[in-house]
Amino acid sequence: MAQDPTLVAASDHWTQNTPAANRPHLGGYVRLPLAMLRRHDAPRWDWYAMYEGSHTPTRVARAEARLSEHEIDDLDLRGYQSLYVRGSDFQGRSALLLQSLEAILGDESIPPSDRFMILARSAAGELDRQFRPSDCGAYFELSQRIGALIANLVGRLRVTPSDIFTIRTESEGGSFGAHALYASAYAVTLADALGMADDNNRRQLAIGALLHDIGERRLPLENFTKSSLSEVERQMIYKHPQIGYEDLLGRDGIEFAQLMMVYQHHEWVDGHGYPVQILREEIHPWARVLAVVDEFDSLTCNRIPQASITLEDTIKHLSASSGSQLDKEAVRCWTSLFRRR
Ligand SMILES: [Fe+2]
Ligand SMILES: [Fe+2]
C-alpha cells in the first residue's frame, strides 16, 4: 500500500535529518544523546558509534576513561549527536541515572527532545520495577516525580508528538512502564494542543496518565500478552479501571480528574465502553484525551509486538473510531499533529 505523503513518520524524519550513525533500531543497544558524555554526574558506560558504511557499532569511549571535550566536540562536528550504550550495561546502571535525573534534565545545553529521551529510557524501567501486585504506594510516589518531569519537558518545552513517537518506536516494546510513560507524554501534548492544559494542571494530567492502568497490576500479566482471550479472561481485564480507581480513592494527593482518567479511560463516547457504559458528556475531558493516546500507543507499540501496526494504519483506525469509541475533536486534533504543516 502506498504511504500517505502527508504523515510525518518517524522513519521519514530520521532518513531526512540524521546521518546513518544516529539512526535508531540498533538491536541490543540503547540510543542516548552525545551531550550526556559531557556531564560528570552521568553514569559511566562504554559508548558506541555506528560509523558510515559499518554494520557493527564501534566503541568510542570506555566506561573507565572519559573522552576529552575536544574528542566530544569532534564527534559532534561529524554529526554524531547520539551514541549507543549496550542494553545490558544501560540496565545495570539506570538506577544511577535516576539519581541525577533532575539535574541532567535541567541542562539547557541538551535539546528538549534529547532530554525527553533520557527521561523515557531511565523512567520506563523504574516504573516497571515499582509495579507490584501487593502495593501501589511506591508506584504512586514515583509517578509524582516522573509526572512533574514529563509536564515540564513535554509541556513547557514543547517536545512534539513526532519526537516522542520516534523515541518510542526504538525502545523495547510495550512493557507496562513504557506504555504508562509514553501515554502520559502523549496526553500532555494532546491536552496542550486542545488548549486544556496549563502550567497548573499539566502535572496532574501527566501523573493521572502514568496511573491509568495501575489496576492491571492485580491481574495475571499473561492475560495482557495473549493474542486471544477466553471470555473469563476478557471480563477480568475489563475490571482494571475499577480496581485502579478503588486502589487510588482516598489516597493523599489524588485529584478527582486523575481518578476519572483511571476509571473512565475505556469508556466509549457512544456508551459501548467499560466499566459502566456512560456517554460522552459523562466522561471526564481528561479521560477522553487519554483514551485517544492510550489507543494510539497500544496500536503502535503493542505488548504483543506482532500486533503493532504502522503509524499510517493507526491514524486510519483512530479516525474510523472517532465519534463511536473516541472523542471526535480529540481524534481530529491528535491526527493533525502527525501531519505535515
Ligand atoms: Fe487500560
Ligand atoms: Fe493503557
Image: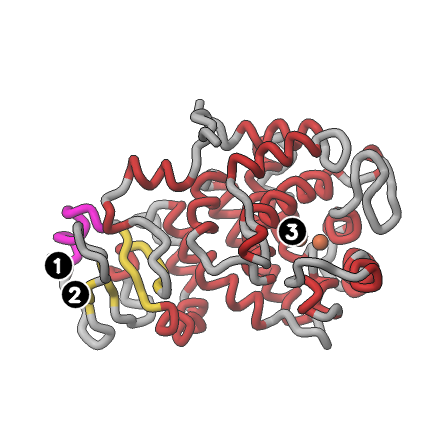
| Helix, strand or loop: magenta stretch | helix
Q: Classify residue 196 as left or right of residue 77.
A: right
Q: Which mark is residue 209?
A: 3
Was residue 34 drawn as part of the magenta stretch in this picture?
no
Give the amino acid type for the residue marked by disc 2 in the picture: Leu
Residue in the image at 66% along x and 65% along y: 140
Give residue 32's quadrant in the image: bottom left
Q: Dot 1, how many residues are within 10 Å of its Cα: few (below 14), some (14-19), or many (20+)?
A: few
Q: Is residue 250 visible?
A: no
Q: Dot 2, how many residues are within 10 Å of its Cα: few (below 14), some (14-19), or many (20+)?
A: some
Q: Which mark is residue 71?
A: 1
User: Secondary structure under badge 3?
Assistant: helix
Image location of residue 173, percent across then percent down: 51, 58
To which residue does mark 2 refer? 67
Q: Classify residue 282 as left or right of residue 141.
A: right
User: Secondary structure under badge 1?
Assistant: helix
Q: Is residue 170 visible?
A: yes
The answer to whether mark 2 and mark 1 are in CB contact below 8 A is yes
Residue in the image at 56% along x and 55% along y: 181
